[in-house]
Amino acid sequence: MSSWNELGVVDTIYEEEYEHSSSSSPSLPPSLYSSPPTPLHSRVESWSLATRQKTDVKIYVMGTCFHLHKDPLTSRSSYLKRQLAELSEITLPLNITAQTFAIVADFCYGTHVVITPFNVAPLRIAAELLGMTETNGKRDENLKQITETYFRRIITVNRELVRVVFCSCLRLLPEAETTAFLVSRCVEALNSTGESEEMLDGCVDDVINLAAEDFQMVGESMQCRLDSHDVLYRIVDLYIKERSSMITEEQKIEICNLVDCDKLSTQCLVHAVQNPRLPLRFIVRAMLIEQLNTRRTLLRTTPTTTNHQYACGHQTGGSVSLGSILYRDAAVREAAQLKAEMDTTNSRIESLEKELARMKKLLQKSEKERISMEKKLLQKSEVETRAMEKVKVSHKSEKLLLESEGEIKSGLGSRLEEILHESEMEERSIVKSSARSASFHHEGREANKIEKGERGSASFAGFRLHFGGERTEKSSLPKFAGNNNGQGLINRLKGTLWMSKTASRCNSQSKSTKKKNGNGDRSNGDEDIGVTYAPSDHKRSRSLG
């Protein structure tokens, strides 16, 4: 490896003008490693004091606000020059962190930035995104030139530094690849050191975590930059091995197409032919390329043998043997046959791919039909289940209704019986009280004494009620044939209530008549109520006068 002096690490690449501007001696070449940068706010204050101008722009970068001057920014960055032409407050929508932008702003104010393997990738990307291609003088360099020089002269010659930059670039995708091809250049640098296997072992965790789109973008850049695709094939094989369950078959085919089989070595071709993880089309292509390379090798050696035999023939007598001519013709015919076989195989592969695509479409269609049929069956079963549930609920409600109706009927019957019993008891008590009252008022009068069996005596078992000349006689309470007949219970209840009311009225009228006449007799034109006892052979008796 070359020494540090030969690489130019100690030598300088740009001069520190702010320290030696007054010196008349020849300027020294600028240095890769300058002094630590001045804090940005101090630099802004110094600029304000020197120019007597206040900060006139605000730039927001990922939530951080920078109060800066417009002139130094627009003199270094073409992007900021366009954005700040009419605005004094902008927000950077770019993939630039606040720390990186602080270094860029410090550079715009004239401070020489310190570039390290950890910030070279962010600064290189920021220089491309912000258009840091402007200079302030003939001997001045812009940020893009400074970072590019550092990457080429310091990073690419050291495998450990390449790994550091490679890991930092993976976190800055896709800008790291679209702006400066940093990822593919790191892989190219690792490949040039001859330690590809160690590189894959050290970067395996970072590579497998890339998304399929980012990996494909990096692979496309590597495809154009690499002369040999052995490293690219190993990376692709590693990526498919680790993420085969996370990517689709189409993505796998697109990733494998990044590898050019014509640029693979014989060892990689043999490995690809025996690799079960790769798509079938790529395996067949690798197999054909391997056979073609073998035939090419044979064809290269055949003219040499023929020329050697031809020279020997000239030495012996200038004649060419028939065997050499036949061997050459056979090799030509074999090459033509091989080419025809390759064309036939390619056409077969294409037809198989078309058939496979058609079968996939049919499978997808049948799968959709199956899913729709399952949905219909599921909906039908749900409808039937709901109907059965409704029937069960209706049966259950009918059963509950019948039970409640029976309970209501039984409760109503028992309640009617209780009312009937209470009415009978009340009727009996009223009859007894009426009889006692009548006997009490008539026992003092001999003329009005009622004999046994006569009308009005206590032994008379019937009531005779007279309302306006109409007489009604009830000798006993009606009896109902059965307790389960609802109409009979209602009629019985009505009869009982009527008898109770009649007895009450009889008793009250009897008492009022006794008070008026003084002798307990009652006479009232149309109404005549009496209590009599009639034996079985007694005829209708007249009412009390």
Image: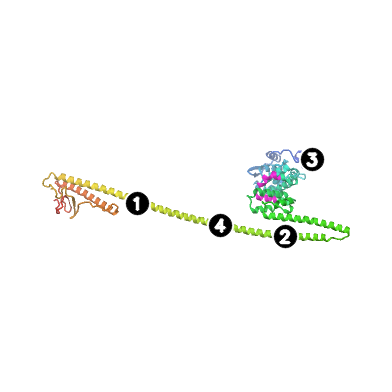
Residue at horizontal 63%, vertical 59%? 358
Three-letter amino acid code of the residue under disc 2:
Glu
Magenta segment: 199-219
User: Of callouts 2 and 3, which one flags the residue occurring earlier in the amino acid sequence?
Assistant: 3
Judged by depth in the image, the label closer to the viewer, 1 or 2, is 2
- The three-letter code of the residue at mark 3 reads Asn
Nearer-N-terminus badge (2/4): 2
Residue 28 makes an appearance in the image: no
The residues bearing labels 4 and 3 have C-alpha atoms spaced at a distance of: 73 Å
Where residue 133 sits in the image (x, y, percent)?
Answer: 73, 47
> Which residue matches tag 4?
370
Decide which of tag 1 and tag 4 comes sooner along the chain: 4
Circle 2 crowding by C-alpha within 10 Å: few under 14, some 14–19, many from 20? few
| Element type at mark 4 | helix
| Residue 191, x across and y down, in percent | 74, 47
Residue marked by disc 3: 5
Give how far apart the Cα atoms at labels 3 and 1 are.
114 Å
Count neighbours of disc 1 (C-alpha within 10 A) and say few if under 14, some if 14 to 19, many if 20 or more.
few
Give how far apart the Cα atoms at labels 2 and 3 are: 58 Å
